[in-house]
Amino acid sequence: MKRLRTLIGIVLGLAIVAGAGWYISQTGSSPAPRQAGRFGSGMPTPVGISTVTKGEVPVVIRALGTVTPLQTVNVKTQITGQLLKVDFKEGQMVKQGDMLALVDPRPYDVALQQAIGQQQKDEALLKNAQTDLERYRKLVAQDSIARQQLDTQQSLVRQYEAALVIDQAAVDAAKLNVTYTRIVAPLTGRIGLRTVDPGNYVSMSDATSICIIIQIQPISVLFTIPEDALPQVRDRLKAGAKLEVRVLDRAQKNELAVGRLDTHDNLIDITTGTVKLRAVFDNKDDTLFPNQFVNIRLLVDTVKDATVVPVAAIQRGQPGTFVYLVKADDTVEIRVVELGATDGDKVQIVKGLQPGDEVVIDGTDRLRDGAKIRRPGGGPPRAASGPPIANAPDPAHGGAQGGDQQRQQRRRQANGGGTGGAAAAQPNQ
């Protein structure tokens, strides 16, 4: 029984070895070569290339701002009375001094007449007292009256003189009240919607104003910048530079106005680490509207004769800030660079590149140090050596048929006859 088991094991082992040998003979001793991928090992990587140039790089601070009028006035009455009429249209432009509304002036005309009457009465009393004073002085000189009576008359004259000062002030106040019955525009600007209609009783204590006037020409824009950018702005202002400010719409597609930086706030907001700035614009075409949100471009300075590359060339990784520098043999090298000012799609290179160098701006995600590249328009990629793989017969697609055709051609050439021999000999004639 033990021998039988051993014999069965030997037979099974031989069967396994024979099966493995048959499988190897059918599939071949080595796997079929695999076709390399399009951008596989050894294949050049197509990239976009740009040349390092010299140029100017504007130093621009970008911020969000709000259009803010330089002056806003709530027009209210300075007296009490009935509003008789309103002489403005909502939304119209008015000039300083234009009449806006009229408060009933009749009570104040009467008060003016009363003040004038009191003034005339006191003037007559003063004139009479002065006449008596001159008479008393003559009598005192003649020892006809007591000295005390002269002193009393002098005091009476001074009293009437003081009363005339008070009367004159009352007349001026009454005239001023009459003037206040005509409400005029305190500045040149645009009127908003009317909040009080004619016929209403108005007074200085009213919480609601008659209208609001805002100055829109010129107009300002308030915006904030980081505190780290403030020293550069202050240095330029101290040097007497007029910093240009451009305003763009919310979508940053249309430029609305160009103005200049006027001033900055006197403190930094400790909660946000920013400081407020004010820019002034002529706004002659009324493109800027109060409380409108806008995008700000503050031109602080311009770096001249700078080494410039596209921003797309800048990469960041383990080496730091770097670019892929294109070498003469169409390979790339990682070159660490130091950046300067940035403006939109271009950036200044302070250190690491020279004008005329070429850097990769597209396809950087497939590159590594020393990788082979294919320039734009450089033709289809080829393998590193040997003929294109596509020329080799593919056993899975007619490989056997191609082999039979080659064997038949060699047989005809060896016999020196047939169509194949003539065709083969013809190029040597």
Image: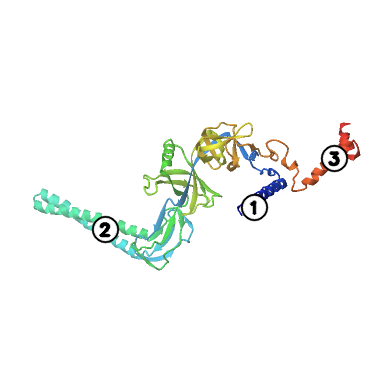
- Of labels 1 and 3, the one closer to you: 1
Q: How is the image coloured?
A: rainbow
Report if residue 218 is visible in the image: no
The answer to whether residue 8 is above or below residue 195 is: above
Residue position marked by numbered label 2 in the rendering = 119
Q: Which mark is residue 409?
A: 3
Label whose residue precedes the other's in the sequence (1 or 2): 1
What kind of element bears circle 1? helix
What kind of element bears circle 3? helix
Label whose residue precedes the other's in the sequence (2 or 3): 2
Residue position marked by numbered label 1 in the rendering = 8
Q: Residue 130 at x, y = what percent?
A: 19, 53
- Residue found at the very far bottom of the displayed protein: 199
Q: Residue 189 at x, y = what percent?
A: 46, 54
CA distance for labels 1 and 2? 149 Å
CA distance for labels 1 and 3? 53 Å
Q: Say whether residue 127 is left or right of residue 92.
A: left
Q: Are marks 1 and 3 in contact (CB under 8 Å)?
A: no
Q: Nearer the viewer, residue 403 or 12?
A: 12
Q: Amino acid at mark 2?
A: Gln
Q: Amino acid at mark 3?
A: Gln
Q: Quadrant of residue 209?
A: bottom left
What kind of element bears circle 2? helix
Q: Amino acid at mark 1?
A: Ile
Label whose residue precedes the other's in the sequence (1 or 3): 1
Going 53% across and 32% down the picture, which residue do you hit?
352
Q: Quadrant of residue 119?
A: bottom left
Report if residue 318 is visible in the image: yes
